[in-house]
Amino acid sequence: MFDHASFDAHEGVHAFHDADSGLKCIIAVHSTARGPAAGGCRMWNYANGDAMLTDALRLSQGMSFKNAMADLPLGGGKAVIWGDPRKDKSEALFRAFGRFVENLNGSYYTAEDVGIDTADMAIVRRETRFVAGLDEGAAASGDPSPITAMGVYLGIKEVAKRLFGTDDLSGRIISVQGVGSVGGHVCEHLAREGAKLVIADIDQEALKDISAKTGATIVAPDEIYDVEADIFSPCALGAIINEKTLERLRVKGVAGAANNQLIVPEMGEFLRRKGMLYAPDYVINGGGIINVAAEISGNYSREWVDGKLTHLIETLGEVLDEALSTNQPTNSVADRIARQRIAEARTSK
Ligand code: NAD
């Protein structure tokens, strides 16, 4: 564990096994310096145990950074369940998971992530209070996608301001990869402001729907990287900024919702050298976790959410300005600020 390449001074890494339900689960708590560790639960058919551990370690660190940049009273953690979400789900499995979360006594709050939906979390809730992202209940925050999308839209404007001297997007060409829950809302915001959209998705229905609503031009999934646009907004997959796409992108900025857009952190520097301004993913897409944090507080308030989102986008602007004025990659600047915020919280604790 302590020699693992993705180990980053995690406070705790808990491996749980429940023989009756077959649950195999790792809950990684990266940091509780700023508050209880919060981050979703992912269910994935990992190739092996090491791939599972690597995911838990990396994702929990990412949540610490995301929560710190959104200035939330939360640390970072993540749960991963080993299994095929289409075949291996059962009530017993999620109840066992809930008991393990409860055993951590509030040092970790769980929620949905890839492979997990609100119905699964409703089962988890029967065993533990430490769960968010529910559809029902006094503080239930529901679908975070519209808030995430609002943050991404405002983030695109911050990037535009630095690139073009104005955040007015009318007439700007924006290419959007993925028009699902977040990407679809982003497109609607952009179209209302008069941006010209080029979109790609593998879901034909989603494409038709968003194109009808926004007048967007549709291109094939693989062609989105070749579109000559002002800003590229990845809202589908991770690792889409890689050696191959870097050669193809003909845009001035990259700003979208997808998690882990850079295949490796060094891609941030390569984007910078190519003159592309990148909005660090875990900063621009923090709207969703702000919404979840409001639920964890036990007293959901839309006003509080909007205030935090405004503050987050200001922080994004500061990251972009510092990176531009010091010739550093934006992701390095964001990482430094996140680490500093976590270290300060640890000291004052
Ligand atoms: P979603 O599943 O609703 O939408 C993703 C869309 O991408 C789908 O329409 C899917 O068909 C499309 N897609 C899949 N493969 C594709 C490909 N090869 N080319 C083009 N399109 C493809 O998911 P979402 O909730 O909109 O999230 C989008 C991204 O944003 C994910 O990376 C997610 O982790 C991240 N994110 C989401 C939230 C949130 O609040 N939902 C918050 C933070 C980050």
Image (cartoon, rainbow, N blue to C red):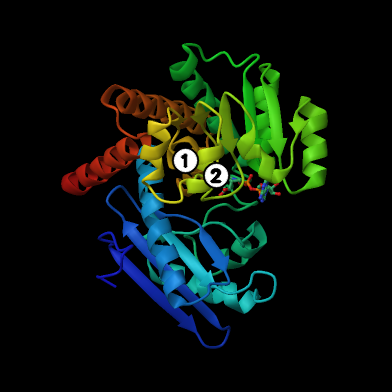
Q: Is the distance from the Cβ of mark 2 to the nearest ligand 1 atom less than 8 Å?
A: yes
Mark 2: which amino acid?
Ala
Q: How far across and down, in percent of the image, does residue 150 sit?
A: 58, 30
Count of number-bearing discs: 2
> Looking at numbered disc 1 in the image, what kind of residue is underneath it?
Asp
Name the residue tied to disc 2: 258
Given contact means CB atoms under 8 Å apart, are the residues at marks 2 and 1 in contact? yes
Say if residue 259 shows up in the picture. no
Along the line of sight, the residue nearer the viewer: 336 or 41 = 336
Q: Is residue 89 above or below residue 258?
A: below
Q: Is residue 112 above or below residue 348?
A: below
Side of 22 relative to 184 (left or right): left
Which residue does the numbered mark 1 point to in the structure image? 281
Give residue 200's position: percent from left, percent from top. Answer: 71, 40
Mark 2 surroundings: few (<14), some (14-19) or many (≥20) residues within 10 A: many
User: What is the secondary structure assignment of the residue under circle 2?
Assistant: loop
